[in-house]
Every structure is written in structure tokens, then in C-alpha cells.
Amino acid sequence: MSWLSDDAIFRLQTATALPDLSATRYRIVERIASGGMGTVYLAEDSVLGRRVALKILDVPDTSGELAARLLREAKILARLEHPGIIPVHGAGTLADGRVFYAMKLVEGQRLDELVSRGESLPHRLRLFQRVCDAVAFAHARKILHRDLKPENIMVGPFGEVLVMDWGIAKSLRGGGSLDAAMEPNEGSLARDTSDSAITAHGAILGTPGYMAPEQERGEVGSLDERSDVYSLGAILQYLLKTGLDSSANAPRPLAAIARKAMASNPADRYTSAGELGLDVARYLDGLPVSAYPENIWRRAARWAVRYRVAIVLVLTYLIIRALLLLWFRR
């Protein structure tokens, strides 16, 4: 009798725990991560010869509701063809009845990991603009994300920005042909993770600290684009505070933008993610922002900062000319 080493036993246990993909075009390479109802694997597409990410349902689902939710997530992503939203390559069912979908393999860092390295504020704001663009696109397709946070945003090695994890997204009325049967049923599903929870109707969906007040109160029917705008404002506030000099205060216009986006009353927030992104763009361009009314002194200070190079050149010219005039009058 031969004895197996601990490493060999571990490899066997790992292999037996992996889902059976023999009837599909994919081959699992390794496990990447797990969430509330599914596990994500790195896999190879044998037909196209590329690596993909597979999200596979891995919890008991006798009712079929979790499988419906996973397929609904894939359908939502399939509707959102945008450079800032992860694309879906296909979906299917395994031999054991578990559903899965294949998506682009995203390499890079989460936004929270990136900013902890101390990236400059302008760079952070440009990344944030691209997040706003992706969310605005989803809103135009009548889809709310409902769980926007730095951990759900990936930044690729070439600067690409992708909004991830649309598992609790909501389709607004008039949103097109999304199967009504795939709509989330807050009254019957239960998910409990460290970041978010779905329980009975009226309970919390999302992540504390990034949810709009109406979302925290479980007012599902009152959620609209401004609920995601609140979450974007919380992300902006995070970008202004994390990884930078703790003794420095955020620029007042940016702090005002974050406050407006995170207003308790939805009517006081930006009406859209695009409007929020535009105000950030105006700040980056040295222009006034709608959230921060300026008096004449603030306007003059902003103008001086925007044209500081030209002002320095003109002042230098005037000083040199004055010195020359004094010299020749001697």
C-alpha cells in the first residue's frame, strides 16, 4: 500500500470540489473568489483560446430563485455594452443543474487598493469621471446598480475602469425587454455576506456607508438614479480622504460636490450620474462648479490658479521691464 502526501491529498480534494465543466467549452484553471451566492473561477475557453472568468452558482437552490438571479445578472450585463462595464461572453447550465455565466477576465486592482498607494487627486478624479460615465450609461438603459463602492470598481493595467458586481441591480420601469421573471424578489431571497444583505421586503440591499438613506430604509419602490448618485458621492468622499495627506483638507468645491451628491433628500442631489461627473470635470478644468457658489474673491482665486503660468510670465516681464527702466534712468 502506498501513502499519499499531504500535498497530493490537498490537490485531490481541490479537484473533486471543482465543478464539472466537461460538457462545456471551458476548463477551470483556478478559483479566484467567492461571493454571496456564487464562486468565480479563472477558466480557459477551448474554442476561442482565451482566458475568461466563470461565475458559477455554488449554494443549494431547491427553489431555483438563486439560479434565476444569477441569470438575471448575466442578462443585465449583456444589455450594458459599455467600455466601463464588464462584458458577458455567454451563459449556460452545468450537468448538475448549476447555472453559470462567462465574462471578461479583468486584471488589475480594485479602486480601494489603488488609492491606498497614494495616487494623485487629479488621477483619482479622472478615474471617478469614468465610473460616472459607466453608471450614467446604465441609467440610460434603466438599470440601477444599487451596490456602488470602491471594492466593486476595477482599474486595469492600461487605465481601463470597469464597474463590477451587478448582482443586486434593479431594472426600472420602461427598461426594455428584460425578462420580468428575472426581477429581484426582495420578499423571498436571502443573502447574507460581510458587505451586503438581501432579506425580507423592506430590508437592506447594498453596503452600509454607500447606500442612500431611502435604500437603507428599504424603500425599494422609491429608488431611482439619484440613489446611485448618492453612492457615487460616497465614493468621491472616499477618494478625497483615503491615502492622501490626512492633515490636508479636501478642496472646497470637491467637498461641496460630494455633499450635494450625498444629500439626505434625493431632490437636493444631482439629478444624474452624468451631471455629477460634469461638475467634477469642470473642477479639473478650473471652471466653477454648480455645487459651490463663488463670491468675487473666490472667483479671482480660481482664475489665478487656472492661469497661473500666464500670470507668472506677465509678472516676470513687468518686473524685468521695470528693472531695465530704472537701470537706464540712472
Image (cartoon, rainbow, N blue to C red):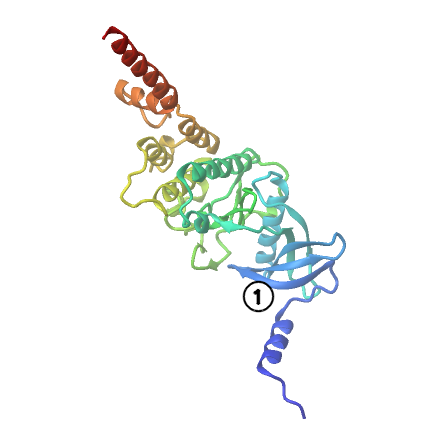
State the image coordinates of residue 179 (x, y, percent, origin top left).
Answer: 63, 44
State the image coordinates of residue 326 (x, y, percent, origin top left).
Answer: 25, 10
Q: Does residue 111 appear left or right of residue 68 in this picture?
A: left
In the picture, which quadrant includes the C terminus?
Answer: top left
Residue behind mark 1:
60
In what element is the residue under mark 1? loop
State the image coordinates of residue 151 (x, y, percent, origin top left).
Answer: 46, 51
Mark 1: which amino acid? Pro
Residue most extreme to the left: 330
Answer above or below: position of 17 versus 114: below
Q: Does residue 208 appear left or right of residue 104 in this picture?
A: left
Answer above or below: position of 180 versus 187: above
Which of the two residues, 268 or 316, is positioned nearer the viewer here? 316
Residue most extreme to the front: 330
Q: Give the residue at x 28% y 14%.
A: 323
Residue 237 seen from this side:
yes
Residue density around tag 1, few if under 14, some if 14–19, many if 20 or more, within 10 Å: few
State the image coordinates of residue 50 (x, y, percent, origin top left).
Answer: 70, 53
Q: Give the residue at x 36% y 23%.
A: 308
